[in-house]
Image (cartoon, rainbow, N blue to C red):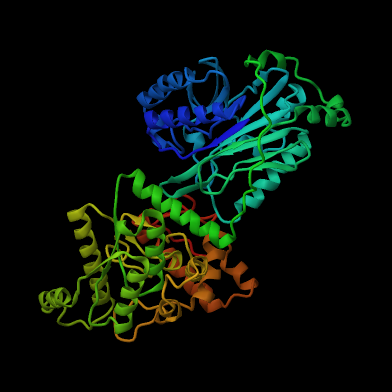
Amino acid sequence: MAMAQINVVVGDLDGNAARIIEWMDRARSMEADIVTFPELALTGYPPEDLLLKPQFVAENLKILDAVARSATGLTAIVGFVDRRDDIYNAAAILSDGRVAGVYHKAYLPNYGVFDEFRYFQVGRLSPLVQVGDSRIGLSICEDIWYPDGPVVDQVMAGGAEVIINISSSPFHAGKRLWRERMLATRAADNIAVVAYNNLVGGQDELVFDGDSLVFDETGQLLARGPQFEEDLIVVDLDLDSVFRRRLHDPRRRQQEVDADAEENVVSLSLPAVEKKPLRSREPIVLLSEDAELYRALVLGTRDYVRKNCFEKVVLGLSGGIDSALTATVAVDALGASNVVGVMMPSGFSSEGSVSDSAALGRNLGIELMTIPISKIMGAYSADLTEVFEACSPDVTEENLQARIRGNILMALSNKFGWLVLSTGNKSEVSAGYCTLYGDMAGGFAVLKDVMKTTVYRLASYCNVAAGRDRIPKEILEKPPSAELRPDQKDTDSLPPYDLLDPVIEAYVEKDHSVEEMLDMGFDEAIVRRVVSLVDLSEYKRRQAAPGVKITPRAFGRDRRMPITNKFRG
């Protein structure tokens, strides 16, 4: 069997169909009997409210028939949207140039980033595919996470020896190990081969990591796809070993058999051809935690920019760690020739910030611009002198500088068609230490879900991975500062990041209360201050650009808090 771990585009029905046919041809050239594609591969995942457009559903069905005509000499399992009495998240069984059968997803996730109950009807049947002497059960993503789901019916009642799970499972840190344990358990518990085919690519905030897997009937790993890359994973399956192992397991003999199971079998024929055994391929080397996070940021940025038809990006370079890491990600995603860095010094900018930004630009090989803002700020100040006559300078003047810089970046975007990358991190966005229409201005926020302490980790990882200081050590070592007033430091407004980030993680990502955090040993003054900052800054986050999700609980899709809200703690 072959699993096509591909990158598709939401709504690009023609393009996705062409991609499916291309990878079907590759599987055929590898002498595969069956090839699988990810969940909703034809429409892209998640299609969201495109599913409420009848013409979108109808077009997807029309194009599925065209894809089916290319399914000759092998069987293909393709994710699409089916329409019966309602619409279904479905897997089409394509064989002999036709749609031979359809499976409807039974378990519809409605938590975190998922809204499938908003769109789909629940599937009720668990059809089996008979290919020669082998029986295959189909499932879609969430279906296999339940130990008593359709997998059990297909194995116990229908005798399925292989369970194919087509999936579009988004990445977040730590998910891979959890997912692997679950799939290995399903294989061993059901004495069946489990083949998990995951999507790869970026879609808005989401990143899909691929990492498709095949486990044998004992729960041992047979094959793995690479992380964050397209690939065709091809593996020979020995289904006689499944039968032999089942002979020694009495559980199936005690199970009540569904008398209707035989009615749900789709029988397919394949040409009898002698096949050569596969050559063994080099084992996939798993990425470290920091490498996973960095690759997710690169893939999410590349696909957001490219799939939205931009060529180049522009960002402000402040001499700080956040803009340095954002620029490095952008270069690795798009190439140095497609990244423009803009230095916008003011009277408060240190000489080191300008020189460090220039050194970063040279290290990365990107185009650099310098557009000072002192004259513009002077004009603002002069025009506001009379209005502000009775007021002392405060954060208003600081925010004006940030907004001038945001205006300059957006002007470059308008003039040259470049996408603006904002550079704020999750720690700042959580605490509201950011300026609406200033440093928050932009089309995509690369570090939106990356804590400040993780920013430093990833910056160090970039240098170690490159074997040189792509990000100058001066940037890594300097105290973080917005440089909007004399001698300003982030710690003037926030607790140190090594104290701030654990509180944000506990409150934002794990929903701990103030009392629980105090019991965990956090400082009370810091906890109450941070909780207040997080709660009062929701209106800013609602207006922020989308950014790559890398944690289990990201702002926006995962954490949806009301702006008008009196509850505290």
What residue is drawn where x is 35% and y is 61%? 540
Please say if 377 is above or below 43: below
- For the question of whether residue 85 can be seen, the reply is no
Residue 218, how many percent across, how many down? 78, 39
Position of the N terminus, as image quadrant, is top right
Residue 10, how many percent across, how many down? 40, 37
What residue is drawn where x is 65% and y is 18%? 273
Count of numbered badges drawn on the protein:
0
Indicate the quadrant where residue 4 lies: top right
- Taking the image as shown, residue 20 lies to the left or right of residue 59, namely right
Q: Nearer the viewer, residue 237 or 324?
A: 237
Q: Residue furthest bottom?
A: 487
What residue is drawn where x is 20% and y is 54%? 416
Indicate the quadrant where residue 313 lies: bottom left
Q: Nearer the viewer, residue 226 or 399?
A: 226
Please say if 232 is above or below 561: above
Indicate the quadrant where residue 516 lies: bottom right
Residue 62, how many percent across, how many down? 41, 19
Please say if 336 is above or below 11: below
- For the question of whether residue 518 can be seen, the reply is yes
What residue is drawn where x is 82% and y is 26%? 255
Q: Nearer the viewer, residue 397 or 335?
A: 335
